[in-house]
Every structure is written in structure tokens, then in C-alpha cells.
Amino acid sequence: MYQTKQIHYKAIFKQDHDQHKIEYKAKGLFHQDQKTSLDFDTPEGHIQISYDDQEVHLQHGNSLLKFHKEKPLWNQYQLPYGSIALKTKLLKFQNNQDSMKLKYELYDQHGLISTVYIMITMKAYCLVDEHENI
């Protein structure tokens, strides 16, 4: 079943003592089947989050991170200048039709490079929402 949703996406990236936050509001598409997915566009590119019973995939443009719900996974993460090996460790994943929360850690061969928190709220989309932003 496909549903158009009003998405509020917020991500916090923590590296050592630095913190960076990004936030988007966009119209998106929520789909539930054997695998559930959420797709939406931002000024920095397309974001897709998909998940099933075992894995979560987070794609932003050409870059894809895969997470296993029970164990860390090594990924080849695509950057503009090439790919690097990153290990993902999913610490928290909660979801329902109205929200999604992820907390994960990224590692390179030398250790922890960042902890990321992603919070998404999804509301039923209606044309009134779109006209309020004009």
C-alpha cells in the first residue's frame, strides 16, 4: 500500500565533541509490503529508507548504508571522490506509520567516527499543507 506523507526529517551527527544537525520537510511516499520504504527528495538529493525484519537500508543519492538489526555490517560507502569501507552498528530502530527513529554508529578501520540520530515524523499529506508553505 502506497501513501503520500508529509515528512519531517531530522538528523544529528556527533563526531568527538562536534555536532551537526540537518532538517528537512518534504512530501514523500511511504510503502508497506514485504519490505517497507520511505522515499522523499531534499535539496541535497533523494533519500530512501527501507527495512524488513532483519535489515535497514539508508540511501542518500548514490550513497548506501546497510544495517543489520543484530550485528555490525561492513559497507562500501560511496563518496564524491571514491568509496570507503565503513562498519555500521544499529543501536536503535523504532518505527510505525507515523514515525521512525534510528540511532547508529559508523566505524572505519581505526574506530568510531560518528554517532547518528535520525528522527522522522510522517503525517497524512493534504493539499492544504502544501499551500501553507507558499
Image (spheres, helix red, strand yellow):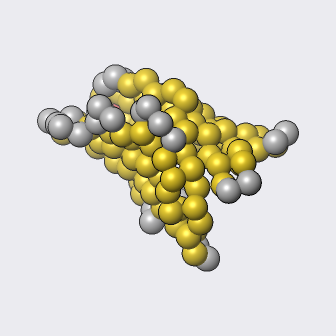
* Left or right of residue 68, residue 19 in this image: right
Residue, far right: 17
Above or below 103: residue 64: below
Q: Residue drawn 45% across and 43% down?
A: 67
| Above/below status of 29 relative to 93 | below
* Horizontal side of residue 124 vs 117, given as left or right: left
Q: Position of residue 118 (x, y in %)?
A: 55, 35
- Of all residues shown, which one is farthest toward the bottom? 81
Give the residue at x 51% y 53%. 74
Q: Nearer the viewer, residue 110 or 50?
A: 110
Residue at image point 49% right, 47% down: 73
Residue 46: image location, x then y, percent? 42, 57
Near-viewer residue (53 or 28):
53
Picture coordinates of residue 6, whole percent (x, y): 38, 36
Tell me the quarter of the image containing the N terminus.
top left
Depth check, front residue: 87 or 97: 87
